[in-house]
Image: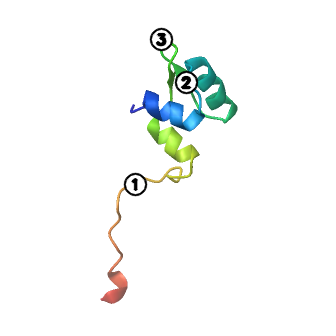
Amino acid sequence: MICLSREELEQVTGRQKFSAQFRWLRMQGFNVLRRADGMPLVARSHFEQMMGCVMPGKKNATQEPDFTSLI
């Protein structure tokens, strides 16, 4: 699982303390885990889905066009 970095968490939440970041993320509806040192863990894929960057259930793979109608 690839997670958001410390810098990204600060930028997204506008907060520097882990506890404040954790609370903000939970209030916004993100699924958040907590590392042993208190740092919030948010999967990058979950963040992108929540922010509307990725459609749920869709892969980011490019699809081949359907050329059957050209024959």
Between the C-alphas of marks 1 and 3, the distance is 33 Å
Mark 2 lies on residue = 16
* Quarter placement of the N terminus: top left
Q: Which one is in front, 39 or 15? A: 15
Between the C-alphas of marks 1 and 2, the distance is 32 Å
Q: Residue furthest bottom?
A: 71
Which label's residue is closer to the chain start, 1 or 2?
A: 2
At x 59%, y 33%, the residue is 14
Which label's residue is closer to the chain start, 1 or 3?
A: 3
User: What's the amino acid at mark 2?
Assistant: Gln
In front: mark 1 or mark 3? Answer: 3
Q: Which mark is residue 48?
A: none
Query: Which of the 4 image quadrants contains residue 31?
Result: top right
Mark 1 lies on residue = 60
Which label's residue is closer to the chain start, 3 or 2?
A: 2
Q: Is residue 50 left or right of residue 4?
A: right
Between the C-alphas of marks 3 and 2, the distance is 14 Å
Density class for disc 3 (Cα within 10 Å; few <14, some 14-19, many ≥20) is few
* Quarter placement of the C terminus: bottom left
In front: mark 3 or mark 2? Answer: 2
Q: Is disc 1 placed on a helix, strand or loop?
A: loop
Q: Position of residue 49 (x, y in %)?
A: 53, 46
64 relative to 54, above or below: below
Q: Which one is in front, 41 or 56? A: 41
- Colour option used: rainbow
Mark 3 lies on residue = 37
Density class for disc 2 (Cα within 10 Å; few <14, some 14-19, many ≥20) is few
Is residue 11 at least partly visible in the picture?
A: yes
At x 32%, y 80%, the residue is 67
User: What's the amino acid at mark 3?
Assistant: Asp
At x 52%, y 31%, the residue is 10
